[in-house]
Amino acid sequence: MKEIELKGLKETIYFEKVLNQMPVYIWKNEKVNGVFSALCVHYGSINQEFKLSDKKKYYKVPSGIAHFIEHLDFYEPDGTTATDFYAKYGSEVNAFTTFDYTCYHLYATDAIKENLNHLLDFVLTPNFNKKMVNKEKNIIIEELLMDQDLPDTKLFYTHYQNLFHKYKYGEFITGKKEDVENTTIEDIELVYDNFYHPKNMFMVVTGNVNPYDIVKLVEENLKKKKLPAYKNPKPKKYREEVKVVEPYTELEGNVENAKVKISVKVPMNLFKNIDEVELRLMFSLIMNSNFGPTSDLKEDLMENELINYMGASRSFIGDYLIMTVTIETKYPKEVIKEIKEQFKKLEMTEKDLKRKVNSNIATMVLRYDDIMGVNNTIQDEVLTYGTIVDNLKEHLENITVEDVNRVIKKIDVKNMAVTVLNPIKK
């Protein structure tokens, strides 16, 4: 077993690729009673077209199928659900599907071995039939119809549709009603059989556990399973053009004040030869400094009562960096103008950088009091980098104001999308 020492944090992540198949990451905390576990599959809603190692053709499945499988996987052979099983132990089990992956997570304080074994069992043991698929369609359609009417959902997906031509991030994770209706058991089995394999998954266990016991448990569990040969499925990659689809869109929704998303779409090839970890950290610092809770812009807008809310984020999607500001306001035109101007004059001072870096390090240290927070951090790093970043604190401390400003100079803000959700006109 490999012990990954997190430099400067005095923490250790234990790692083992069990049976040379499933990567398992473990963080031990003896100060807590509970254990938080996540079993994750590298398959999300955007992976609608893929090919297998023994085939040349691409298979295409309906949108929303990752979420559909997440629902179905909870059913047990005896007609009960995994939720029923965990209720006996007072444990909490749930799952979620994102654009990029699906995750089944569990919190338990008792019978840890039984809980973890069953997590592996119900996720890795398919129990699908036509009757079940047809029954679940109505449940999923009801769920998606409710979600798609929510103002924040409407704004989010419309905005991503305005940003991307080919990437599937503008499509509902649940799929549309017709996608769910058209999903067949053959579609379900094709995806499950090829993506729900230990070699395409990883497990994260955080809490009061013995890492060696966890690895032994996973190994014994996987040995009992008759797993198919892994066909190394490869999702189709799309070439996305630089220009946004729609620079400006207005729509109406059930909101009291206007909600607005403003994003800049920046090609990643502008930042060649820059360390990937530090680049991601720098853009978090840039967005926080210019649009975050203590930024001059936010303080000015709040002081003048122009906004009720402002948040900032950055995301790396395919070949692009997306810098996003989200606001709630009665004065969208005025505030949009201010934010656009700030994007044109992004800056970072030595004083602000030092403050933001120290704040990030403090947050990083405090996170190790929270088994769920650590679990989510490990998931994010594995999904982003394929491994654990053992020197994140060093990367943060290495960033200079000159580095940040060199990156800022490379940013081209001309490819911008603005989506405004206005109150419904009476």
Image (spheres, grey):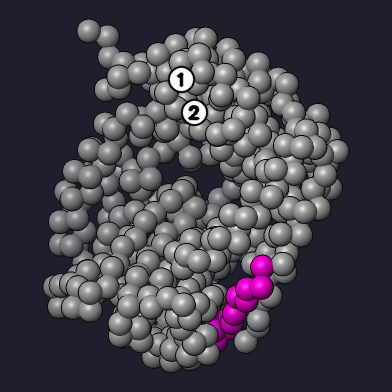
Vertical placement of residue 59 versus 12, above or below: above
Q: Residue at x 50, y 66 (%)?
A: 369
Please say whether residue 288 is visible from this viewpoint: yes
Residue 307 numbered mark, or none: 1
**Pick the front one: 357 or 328:** 357
Tell me if residue 407 can be seen.
no
Q: Quadrant of the C terminus?
A: top left
Q: Amino acid at mark 2?
A: Met
List x then y, in percent, for residue 343: 66, 23
Q: CA distance from mark 2 to mark 1?
A: 7 Å
Could you tell whether 406 is left or right of 230 in the image?
Answer: right
Task: Identify the element where label 2 is drawn.
Answer: strand
Does residue 127 show up magenta in the picture?
Answer: no
Q: Is residue 108 left or right of residue 293?
A: left
x and y percentages locating residue 315 in the rendered image = 59, 42
Residue 13 shown in magenta: yes
Q: Which residues are magenta?
A: 9-21
Marks 2 & 1, CB-CB < 8 Å contact: yes
Residue visible at 61% across and 44% down? 316
